[in-house]
Amino acid sequence: MDLKPLFQPQSIAVVGVSTKNDRHPANVIYKKLQLRYAVTAYAVNPKGGTLMGQTVYPTITQIPDGIDLAVIAVRADFVCGVMEQAVEKGVGGAIVISGGFSEVGNSDLQDQLVALATENHLPVIGPNCLGVYSPNHFDSFFLPGQRLIRPNAGHVAFVSQSGGVLVDQMVKFAGQGVGLSLGVSIGNKAVLRELDFLEYLAADPVTKVIAIYLEGFRDGEGREFVKRAQTCGKPVIMLKAGKSIAGSRAASSHTASLAGDYAVFSQVLAQHGIAEARNEYELISFCESLECYTEHIGNRVGIITLSGGHGVLAVDECAAHGLEVPLLSTETQNEIAGRLSKNVRAIASLKNPIDLTGSATDEDFMGAVTALSRCPDVDSVLILLLPYSPGVSSDLGARLSYIYQEQGRPLIAYVPHEEKYRMLIEGFELNRIPVSNAIDGAVLMVEALRRCQTCRIR
């Protein structure tokens, strides 16, 4: 099936709008499309009429122009009739927002929907979903635009069985500076499933990282997904729900998913180099790191800090994740020392972590990072940057980014995320250096590069 009409439509029919209830989900969607996006939107309701000064068509077939996408938000027992109209019209794809299918035990109705879509080669997202958020293009969420927090356009695609999890992650992506290429809420995934989206996103030139929130696969589907994810050429990050018995039961009632044996599934992901995020926090860290870097790395970390205590915390976090913080050779320590100012050289600790102390300046950081980026004993450099130090300027993030461009050794930074440090943070982010607002988050960014083996073939 061609999925392009689902994600890059030029014309959208919103089916189910009300001329009396402006809060109806279809009205919320239609209003956003009319006011915020460049797509051409058409309203559909059997009673006809007008809405926002535009014609409301009784059926999709009566719309005079071609339609790429139908967004369907009607009562469940009306959905198949609307889809038949869409097929007759030659619509390219459909998003079924409506609930009331297998998630509430109405499997026969969902089977009818699947049969209709399959027989007519109609790609369908849903039912029981929010649908698609495509930055700067359109969104089908029935959530008021003023309440949504939207990440900047970027290179991470997030496919989620839960619309709520997707929207919540968008908030967190925006806060952490992770850019989104596509957000897809797939709900019951009755027709199109993770494999279909994986195939589309693997070929999408904008997407560099594929993240998936999963509640469960069909029997036998997980094996094929893992095989394809391993060879798709892009990092795949999995956040799995339904790990416990109670969670599995909740997943089944949410989207009628079979959660399966989590322990086995988790082991399979690790064996095939797919990065499993254990929680939402790890998901964000992994996404930001893998959006910036393409190379798979080893587990040896070099740490540079202004605070000995921060260095100790970072070493503990590294140890907890199986990352090594090796002692640096005398040769490397001497090279670092030779690049430091006289005052800092006398008091710095250079074994790893490298503690430059609160007296360090931009030039001391530049020298230490340059030397460590050339060191054969580490695979990545973790920079713990405390912007309270009087010798650190707001330009340091951008300046340090140039070292990665010259040396090719991944740099990852910790900087407290406060508005007064925004220029420093943006100096890293605009030059594609990941920045975390917590030490454990920065270590997770290193862990993502070590764990995700698909980076090797990108």
Image (cartoon, grey):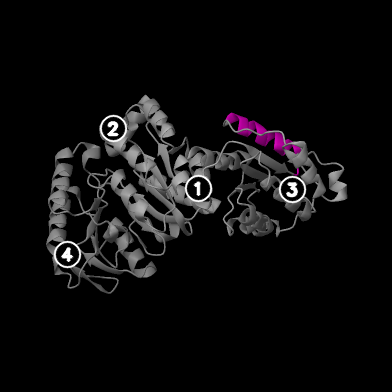
Residue 297 placement, left or right of 136? right
Amino acid found under the numbered disc labelled 3: Ala
Would residue 147 be counted in the magenta stretch? no
Q: Are marks 1 and 4 in contact (CB under 8 Å)?
A: no
Q: Are marks 3 and 1 in contact (CB under 8 Å)?
A: no
Q: Which residues are magenta?
A: 306-320
Residue at 62% across / 36% down in the picture?
300
Residue 42: % across, % down: 25, 68
Mark number, residue 60: 4
Mark 4: few/some/many CA within 10 Å (<14, 14-19, 20+): many
Q: Secondary structure at mark 4?
A: helix
Residue at 41% across / 40% down in the picture?
238
Residue 304 placement, left or right of 164? right
Image quadrant assignment for residue 303: top right
Q: Are marks 2 and 3 in contact (CB under 8 Å)?
A: no
Identify residue for label 2.
258
Amino acid found under the numbered disc labelled 2: Leu
Residue 438: % across, % down: 62, 42
Identify residue for label 3.
368
Pair 2/1: label in front: 1
Q: Nearer the viewer, residue 126 or 59?
A: 126
| Mark 2 or mark 1: whose residue is earlier in sequence | 2
| Mark 2 or mark 3: whose residue is earlier in sequence | 2
What is the C-alpha distance between the residues marked 2 and 3?
Answer: 51 Å
Mark 3: few/some/many CA within 10 Å (<14, 14-19, 20+): many
What is the C-alpha distance between the residues marked 4 and 2?
Answer: 35 Å
